[in-house]
Image (cartoon, rainbow, N blue to C red):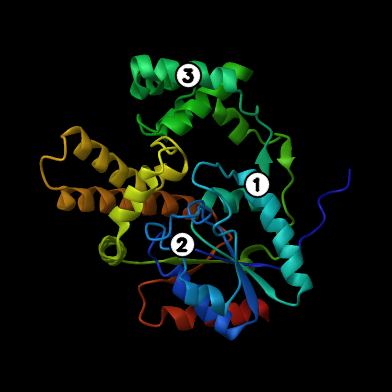
């Protein structure tokens, strides 16, 4: 059987949150004619601008950006949908004589694009409804404990309150009788979307990674403070005010949004009798963002094809541009 049609050359820029990807992407765009494809599961949502550090209007007017503001927060957007959209865009951007530049930190999307997706059972509304009822009765930590028994590998990487992923892992097990980790690890697993001929190998994946953890932690705190100053709390209030969103949606589980949503929930339960505990919410948001960065770094270390640029170096942008010139030949 013939393999997948090779994709045209494309360049990837990644790194943990707050590592400077947007600034580096704009520098690349100023030096080379390109269009940016967002590789970010939060930027797809409309009305979620501040807490996602979405590129601003000026940046988006300077260079075309794709896969931003393509979903309402009530809707889901899967890795499979990303692969289909990204491959279409890579071909179209190349046909326009531009360089496809994929930028973001959703490592699952990169992995799906590079390696394909495992052929696991599709969502089953009936099974999900049963799991939701069980969670309502017993709590997600109890379901997490059940997952430890049937799929300890998956359970080990999930928090006891990670309802979305616990539900999916148990759903897969109850439908197929096989653990989710089986589908992820099986070397001969059939792919629902074949690997997209990543023909340029290691030369095409640039990763911004800092040597000093304290540098990234400082950047995370500074960016979260800036978000709060720009009105992040009001943005979450507006989303809550719609009335059709809830805390278990993928959109509202994004880092920062989840912490503020839960904080506002708690504030309402107290009858708004005290001031919103901003210092506490700030700390929770920063801690969650640090945890996200740690998970992203773990993903990155499993990608041996990446070429690392020291994000906390004084000449980091110069180094990125030099590596891009080398890649482009």
Whether residue 8 is visible here, answered yes or no, is no
Numbered tag placed on residue 15 in the rendering: 2
Q: CA distance from mark 3 to mark 1?
A: 25 Å
Quarter where residue 75 is shown: top right
Tag 2 near tag 3, CB within 8 Å: no
Identify the mark nearer the N-term, 2 or 3.
2
Dot 1 surroundings within 10 Å: few (below 14), some, or many (20 or more)? few
**Above or below for 242 versus 119:** below
Q: CA distance from mark 1 to mark 2?
A: 22 Å
Identify the mark nearer the N-term, 1 or 2.
2
Task: Give the percent coordinates (x, y) of residue 66.
Answer: 61, 63
Q: Is residue 111 left or right of residue 141?
A: right
Task: Give the percent coordinates (x, y) of residue 126.
Answer: 58, 18
- Check the image and name the residue furthest to the front: 242
Nearest to viewer (mark 2 / mark 3): 3
Q: Is residue 238 left or right of residue 281?
A: right
- Check the image and name the residue furthest to the right: 1
Find numbered disc 3 in the image and state the secondary structure of the residue it sits on. helix
Q: Quadrant of the C terminus?
A: bottom right
Which residue in the structure is indicated by mark 3?
A: 131
Numbered tag placed on residue 81 in the rendering: 1
**Above or below for 297 versus 30:** above
Quarter where residue 224 is shown: bottom left
Which residue is more in the foreground, 267 or 34? Answer: 267
């Amino acid at each position: 059987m013939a393999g997948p049609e090779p994709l045209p050359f494309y360049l990837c820029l990644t790194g943990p949150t707050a590592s400077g990807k947007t600034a580096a992407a704009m520098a690349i765009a100023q030096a080379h004619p390109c269009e940016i494809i967002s590789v970010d599961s939060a930027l797809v949502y409309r009305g979620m601008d501040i807490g996602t550090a979405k590129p601003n209007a000026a940046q988006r007017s300077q260079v075309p950006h794709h896969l931003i503001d393509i979903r309402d927060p009530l809707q889901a957007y899967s890795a499979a949908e990303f692969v289909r959209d990204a491959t279409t865009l890579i071909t179209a951007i190349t046909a326009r004589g531009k360089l496809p530049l994929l930028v973001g930190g959703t490592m699952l999307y990169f992995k799906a694009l590079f390696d394909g997706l495992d052929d696991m059972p599709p969502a089953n509304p009936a099974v999900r409804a049963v799991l939701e009822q069980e969670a309502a009765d017993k709590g997600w930590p109890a379901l997490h404990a059940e997952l430890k028994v049937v799929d300890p590998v998956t359970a080990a990487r999930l928090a006891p309150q990670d309802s979305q992923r616990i539900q999916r892992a148990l759903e897969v097990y109850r439908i197929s009788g096989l653990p989710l980790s089986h589908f992820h690890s099986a070397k001969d697993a059939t792919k629902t979307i074949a690997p997209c001929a990543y023909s340029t190998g290691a030369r095409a994946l640039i990763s911004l990674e800092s040597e000093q953890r304290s540098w990234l932690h400082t950047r995370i705190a500074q960016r979260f403070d800036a978000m709060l100053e720009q009105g992040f709390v009001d943005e979450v209030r507006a989303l809550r005010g719609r009335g059709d969103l809830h805390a278990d949606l993928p959109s509202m589980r994004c880092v920062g949004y989840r912490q503020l949503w839960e904080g506002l929930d708690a504030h309402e339960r107290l009858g708004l009798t005290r001031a919103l505990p901003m210092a506490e919410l700030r700390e929770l948001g920063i801690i969650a963002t640090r945890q996200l960065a740690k998970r992203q770094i773990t993903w990155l270390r499993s990608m041996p094809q990446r070429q690392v640029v020291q994000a906390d170096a004084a000449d980091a942008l110069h180094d990125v541009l030099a590596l891009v010139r080398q890649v482009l030949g």
